[in-house]
Amino acid sequence: MWVHLAVLCANEGRCVYCNEARSEVMDHVVPFAHGGPDSLENLVPACDSCNESKGDKTPPEWVMTTHLRHPWNSTDATPSDPLPDLRRLYEHAHRACEETLGRIEATIEETSDKKRRKWILVRSLQFGIPRSRSHIAFCRATFEEELKFAKAVGFPDPRSTGTSALELLSRQSPDETSGTDSTDGL
Ligand SMILES: [Zn+2]
């Protein structure tokens, strides 16, 4: 349960591949079929659609295949369409690949944070064993909200404080919470 939450809530709860859709599943960066381990260092949040289309590909294989499809394959291309600029097509795919790999690295760095791991583990024990899909959805929504604040205050140990990070933060006066914009952007 806690590994699931630790992964799904990373990258601000978004799929690491399209960086748009809400994460729904854990994806193995190095595919399980290729010997990728079932550990936090190899798991990232993904949406169902990207997860399905990535299948057993590695991220570079998947991004390059997806982005190297040129307009010839599109059903509305006509014979008079100019030839695609193959170098630009390649450069675009290469850039998309770099961006995706950067996001994956940042996400794994986030989930590897020891204080974050401990915070999620302890907090998830407090939620108890999830009994239904709606309970899991509730835990996740609550988690995401608390996680944001816990991160802002350096992941206080939920056991020692006995309160959620959200409560902790609300006790601080607005000018203590941030050195810069304390009222905007919260
Ligand atoms: Zn996606």
Image: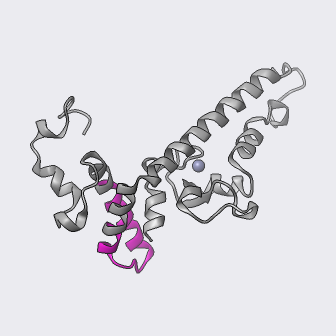
- The x and y percentages for residue 58 are 71, 50
Tell me where the magenta segment starts and ends, as one range. Answer: 123-145
On screen, residue 45 above or below 1: above
Name the residue rendered at 68%, 47% in the picture: 59
Name the residue rendered at 14%, 50% in the picture: 170
- The x and y percentages for residue 153 are 24, 48
76 vs 29, nearest the viewer: 29
On screen, residue 17 above or below 163: above
Q: Quadrant of the N terminus?
A: bottom left
On screen, residue 109 above or below 143: above
Residue 43 in sight: no
Give the number of callouts. Answer: 0
Name the residue rendered at 24%, 56% in the picture: 156
- The x and y percentages for residue 7 are 48, 58
Quarter holding residue 137: bottom left
> Colour scheme used in the picture?
one colour
Residue 129 magenta-highlighted: yes
37 vs 127, nearest the viewer: 37
Residue 107 magenta-highlighted: no
- The x and y percentages for residue 133 are 45, 73
Quarter holding residue 177: top left
Residue 122 in sight: yes
Quarter holding residue 121: bottom left
Residue 145 shown left or right of residue 19 in the figure: left
Name the residue rendered at 74%, 39% in the picture: 64
Residue 145 shown left or right of residue 103 in the figure: left
Q: Quadrant of the C terminus?
A: top left
